[in-house]
Image: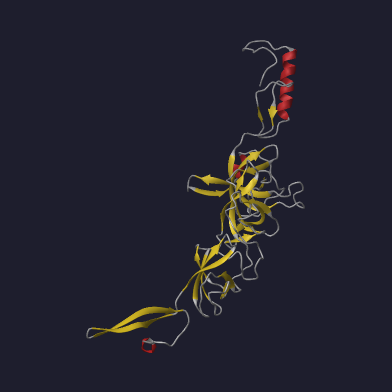
């Protein structure tokens, strides 16, 4: 507080003017909300009042979402319980009445909730934090908004709504995902979408419902909030298949430009990958550069980003036989020359049937 009259010492006499100045200051203090504090800056009342309380951090547990019908003016916000640390048993617990009474904070609901705990508004709308029921987040109390504001690391799980390609789009829509504490499983929230960006165009993912059931799920990922540019950057994305092992659907010769593999070839690399270009329920179309084989041949194919398609890299032999290539006499010995031949189709041929 900055006085408008000289500093007084014990025993000094106060005039009527001094009393009036102190009365004005007392009236201003009486208008302050709990948690407000003075900034020490001169004003017409002798001091300035800052309505934003000092930032005190609390651990909150999100309980439910505030709707516009029951909580007018707070749509999009959440309701949460303050957690406190019990030093006796070294555990986090719900807020007790003694702890809450020390906060001087405004109660949100007009009646006690079923658990006997107090509920407070938690507003993530302007900080980029996405919440779900059961989340535990660190918040600070904002006196101006009368709400808690999350300050945790801004990380969000998502499922792609749009197709993400390495050749063009860097910003696509995605569904937020949340962890259901009742079923102990991650779920996708289809009621809203938000943009995620891939600034280096290094990720590739499929959109939701690109393929029919049971492969309708889009690529899953994780994004981190860039508060400077106000966007969500992709930091992890479910990998796309780059190397597969399958069985040829039919006969093919070296002049065939493409071949087909039976549905659902095994993904060899990378681990945990999914198909993003063709449905695994259908035959997989593969580019062919001079390989030949029969129906049932074991084939390996790799993804070619340049050709935007699968390319055949190897055809496994189905059977190996020995072929006699030459027979001649050397002195008193008969020399038989042979070589191994790999057959890419089933055969009943054996060594005795080989010509010589």
- Say which quarter of the image contains residue 98: top right
Residue 70 spot, x, y in % from top left = 75, 52
Looking at the image, residue 267 lies above or below residue 15: below
Residue beneath the point at 44% across and 77% down: 317
Residue 176 spot, x, y in % from top left = 64, 56
Residue 244 spot, x, y in % from top left = 51, 68
Residue beneath the point at 54% across and 67% down: 311
Residue 148 is left or right of residue 267, and the answer is: right
Q: Nearer the viewer, residue 118 or 271?
A: 271
- Residue 92 visible, this angle: yes
Looking at the image, residue 13 lies above or below residue 304: above
Q: Nearer the viewer, residue 241 or 271?
A: 241
Tell which residue pokes out farthest to the bottom in this image.
353
- Say which quarter of the image contains residue 253: bottom right
Q: Nearer the viewer, residue 286 or 17?
A: 286
Residue beneath the point at 76% across and 51% down: 68
Residue 191 spot, x, y in % from top left = 71, 58
Indicate the quadrant containing the C terminus: top left, top right, bottom left or bottom right. Answer: bottom left
Indicate the quadrant containing the N terminus: top left, top right, bottom left or bottom right. Answer: top right
């Amino acid at each position: 507080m900055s006085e408008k009259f000289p500093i007084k010492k014990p025993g000094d006499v106060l005039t009527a003017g001094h009393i009036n100045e102190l009365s004005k200051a007392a009236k201003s203090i009486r208008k302050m909300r709990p948690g407000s504090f003075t900034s020490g800056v001169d004003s017409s009342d002798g001091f300035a009042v800052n309505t934003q309380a000092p930032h005190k951090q609390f651990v909150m547990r999100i309980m439910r979402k505030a709707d516009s019908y029951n909580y007018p003016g707070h749509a999009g916000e959440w309701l949460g319980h303050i957690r406190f640390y019990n030093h006796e048993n070294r555990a986090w617990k719900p807020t007790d009445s003694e702890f809450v009474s020390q906060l001087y904070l405004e109660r949100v609901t007009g009646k006690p909730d079923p658990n006997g705990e107090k509920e407070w508004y938690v507003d993530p709308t302007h900080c980029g934090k996405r919440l779900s029921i059961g989340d535990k987040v660190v918040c600070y109390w904002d006196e101006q908004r009368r709400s808690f504001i999350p300050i945790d690391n801004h990380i969000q799980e998502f499922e792609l709504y749009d197709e993400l390609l390495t050749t063009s789009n860097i910003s696509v829509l995605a569904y937020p995902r949340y962890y259901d504490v009742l079923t102990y499983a991650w779920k996708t929230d289809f009621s809203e979408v938000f943009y995620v960006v891939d600034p280096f165009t290094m990720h590739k993912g499929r959109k939701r419902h690109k393929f029919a059931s049971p492969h309708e799920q889009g690529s899953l990922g994780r994004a981190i909030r860039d508060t400077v540019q106000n966007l969500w950057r992709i930091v992890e994305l479910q990998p796309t298949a780059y190397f597969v092992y399958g069985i040829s659907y039919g006969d093919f010769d070296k002049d065939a430009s493409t071949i087909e593999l039976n549905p659902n070839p095994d993904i060899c690399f990378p681990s945990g990958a999914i198909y993003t270009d063709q449905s695994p329920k259908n035959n997989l179309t593969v580019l062919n550069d001079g390989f030949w084989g029969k129906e049932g041949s074991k084939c390996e194919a790799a993804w070619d980003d340049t050709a935007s398609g699968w390319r055949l890299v190897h055809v496994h032999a189905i059977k190996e036989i020995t072929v006699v290539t030459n027979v001649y006499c050397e002195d008193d010995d008969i020399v038989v020359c042979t070589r191994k031949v790999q057959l890419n189709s089933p055969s009943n041929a054996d060594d005795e049937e080989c010509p010589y």
